[in-house]
Amino acid sequence: MTVRNIVKIDEDKCNGCGKCVSACAEGAIKLINGKAKLISETYCDGLGACLGHCPQDAITVEQRECDDFNEQAAKKHLESQKKPSPPGGFVCPSMQAKQFAKKDLTKGDVCSQLSHWPIQLKLVSTNAPFLKDTDLLLAADCVPFAMGDFHSKLLKGRSLIIACPKLDDNELYVDKLSEMFKINNLKSVTVVHMEVPCCFGLTKIVQQAITNSGKPLKFEDITISLDGQIKSREFIEG
């Protein structure tokens, strides 16, 4: 046993909605007697992807002594849980990992270059299939709205993840990205953010995550002006 981050569920606040169950990519949470419960410490990676899905704020991440996260055990558990959806059952599309066919820009310069789903960092599993051997683009939420040619200039050929360094949980993102960098053989990492000061936090998040991962990664840092132009580009050592 080691001291590490792990999910904690306040059963008094839990209303049994089950949203955290769907959000947990490792299957570590289950509804038991109308309440969400952590069924095994070894299945929980402690990154807290479920936090943002609880409408009752019943889930937190605490640091305590517990069993180590076992990725292989979690995978076996997930395989054992696979079964057909019940009639009329609904699974939110935002939680279903999908990969799309490659787009050809010759068919129109407004053709989407998005290759997968989901894209929000909170929702993306650290071992998502589209992260394997890929060129990763980590973009601040506002960038695709400000930059009219975002798809053709930056997104094409890359796997996208979006996040907001001002409004989101930066500590959670450092931990999650660190795990992504550690377990996926990324070909390259590109970070793109707006020129406003708070948005530069995304660069710091990635730097810290690379340091924590122990991987000697270099990434390209791109700054976008408020009118949607590329203002600067530089390579940064993690």
Image (cartoon, rainbow, N blue to C red):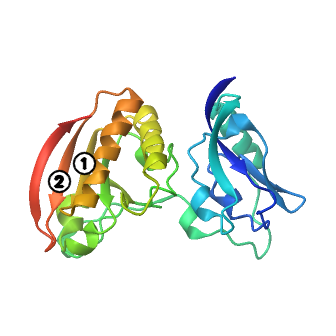
Q: Quadrant of residue 205?
A: top left
- Relative image position of residue 99 (x, y in whole percent): 45, 58
Q: Residue at x 9, y 55 (%)?
A: 232
Q: Quadrant of residue 214?
A: top left
The answer to whether residue 129 is above or below residue 109 is above
Question: For this rendering, which residue is in front, 64 or 1?
Answer: 64
Helix, strand or loop status at disc 1? strand
Instruction: Tell me the number on the disc at residue 222.
Output: 2
Horizontal relation, residue 108 to residue 63: left or right: left
Amino acid type, callout 2: Ile
Location of the C terminus by quadrant is top left
- Relative image position of residue 96 (x, y in whole percent): 57, 61
Helix, strand or loop status at disc 2? strand
Which residue is outermost to the top? 1
Q: Nearer the viewer, mark 1 or mark 2?
A: 2
Amino acid type, callout 1: Thr
Instruction: Determine if residue 158 is in view.
Output: no
Q: Residue at x 83, y 59 (%)?
A: 35
Report, in whole angstroms, how far the alpha carbon at label 1 lies from the one at label 2: 8 Å
Question: For this rendering, which residue is in front, 156 or 183?
Answer: 183
Location of the N terminus by quadrant is top right
Instruction: Determine if residue 81 is in view.
Output: yes
